[in-house]
Image (spheres, rainbow, N blue to C red):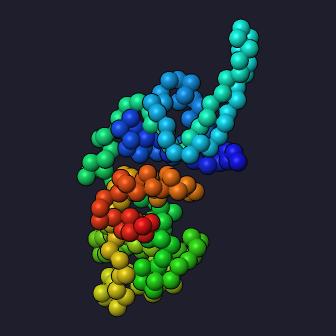
Amino acid sequence: MQNLQQPILRTDISGMPLEWVQYQTVVRLYCTGQVAYTCGTPLLHIRGGVNARTGERSQLVLNSIIATYGSKQSLFGESYTPPLNNPTLFRRDNQVCLYCGEHFSGKDLSRDHVMPLVSGGKDVWTNVVTACKYCNSRKGGRTPEQAGMPLLAVPFKPTYVEYIFLQGRSILADQMEFLSTHFPRNSSLRERWN
């Protein structure tokens, strides 16, 4: 029942998702008095030492979602840009080549620049898509229009909460439900999980 590898979703006191943390970090947050409240499924039952005076053993029950004191509201503005990396990009595009529409494993995917770098394109979320290596090679240094390879979806920059979701490796149902309530109404990620 206890999965020591299951990440726990940490939020600020208002319930805004902040990051994924391991159980050791959650124990440290409890011990330093930083946990405001918990919700979600109980995941781990941690037992500590025995108090010499009272004979009681310390215990913590760690839930799938914890809220900590403080707020990081500055992270959530329109100007926030999450770091761009291939694993997160591939998850944004659901492991699908946005040229041929086929699903691939990560090792068979690559980052393609819609407006090629050689033509002044930028390495930013709104100019990159997931492409299989064959399609990326076939497109080369051309735009999708020049190559006759229309895009199947428009690339977008994830919000902070969408980025938190994309970073998750094994997300529990209650964590997913919690995260999805913070997605923008028009989020393609919301559509994928509804």
Q: Residue at x 67, y 23 (%)?
A: 58
- Residue 60: x and y in percent read 62, 30
State the residue lying farthest toward the bottom: 148
In what quadrant of the picture does the C terminus appear?
bottom left
Res 137 seen here: no
Depth check: 147 or 27 in front? 27
Q: Residue at x 35, y 57 (%)?
A: 183
- Residue 67: x and y in percent read 45, 37
- Residue 12: x and y in percent read 40, 37
Q: Residue at x 34, y 86 (%)?
A: 150
**Total marks drawn?**
0
Res 174 seen here: yes
Q: Does 116 sit above or below residue 180?
A: below
Residue 62 vs residue 158: left or right? right
- Residue 105: x and y in percent read 58, 73
Q: Does 49 sit above or below residue 166?
A: above
State the residue lying farthest toward the top: 53
Q: Does 91 sit above or below residue 116?
A: above
Residue 72 vs residue 19: left or right? left
Q: Residue at x 71, y 14 (%)?
A: 51
Depth check: 166 or 192 in front? 192
Q: Does 85 sit above or below residue 143?
A: above
